[in-house]
Every structure is written in structure tokens, then in C-alpha cells.
Image (spheres, grey):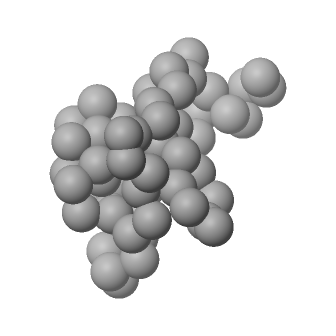
Amino acid sequence: MTDRDRAAACQGPYGGENGLADCGDPVRFEVARHLRAPLRVCPVHLGPALLLADGVLWPPVIILVR
């Protein structure tokens, strides 16, 4: 993992697909999605991303990013 990955901004609340801007907090989790890039989110947006983002696998596949 590079320093750039550690400094990546959260894509929450729903991956920016709804026209909402990224939240800017550091990424802590990566959520796997079907036929889409993984969604990288902060702890605050992990729950909303699991419930509302497009293509999230169920059961969810969540990877801790440090």
C-alpha cells in the first residue's frame, strides 16, 4: 500500500453515484461490488454504503484498509 492509498478520501455516502461529493475523511474500509470498482469508505459511511450503494455483494465483503 502506498502513501497515496492511505490518504485516499472516502467515496461516501454512496460512492458518488448519486451526484454527491466525497466526504473527504480517510478511507478505512473497502466494500466489494458486483461488476463495479470496490467502494472505499470511512467508518461513518460504511453502513450507508452497505445498505444503499449499487452492486454491493450480499453477504457483504468488507476489507479493512489501513
Q: Quadrant of residue 17?
A: bottom left
On screen, 25 above or below 19? above
Comparing 61 with 65, the one in front is: 61
Res. 39 visible in picture: no
Q: Quadrant of residue 44?
A: top left
Mark count: 0
| Left or right: 59 in relation to 61 | left
Residue 30: % across, % down: 51, 37
Find the residue positioned furthest to the top. 66
Find the residue positioned furthest to the front. 59
Res. 16 visible in picture: yes
Find the residue positioned furthest to the bottom. 19
The N terminus: image quadrant: top right
Residue pictured at 59% horizontal, 33% vertical: 7
The C terminus: image quadrant: top right
Residue 45: % across, % down: 26, 44
Comparing 65 with 53, the one in front is: 53
On screen, 13 above or below 27? below
Residue pictured at 58% horizontal, 51% vertical: 38
Residue 50: % across, % down: 29, 49
Residue 64: % across, % down: 50, 21
On screen, 42 above or below 20? above
On screen, 41 above or below 36? above
Residue pictured at 35% horizontal, 82% vertical: 19
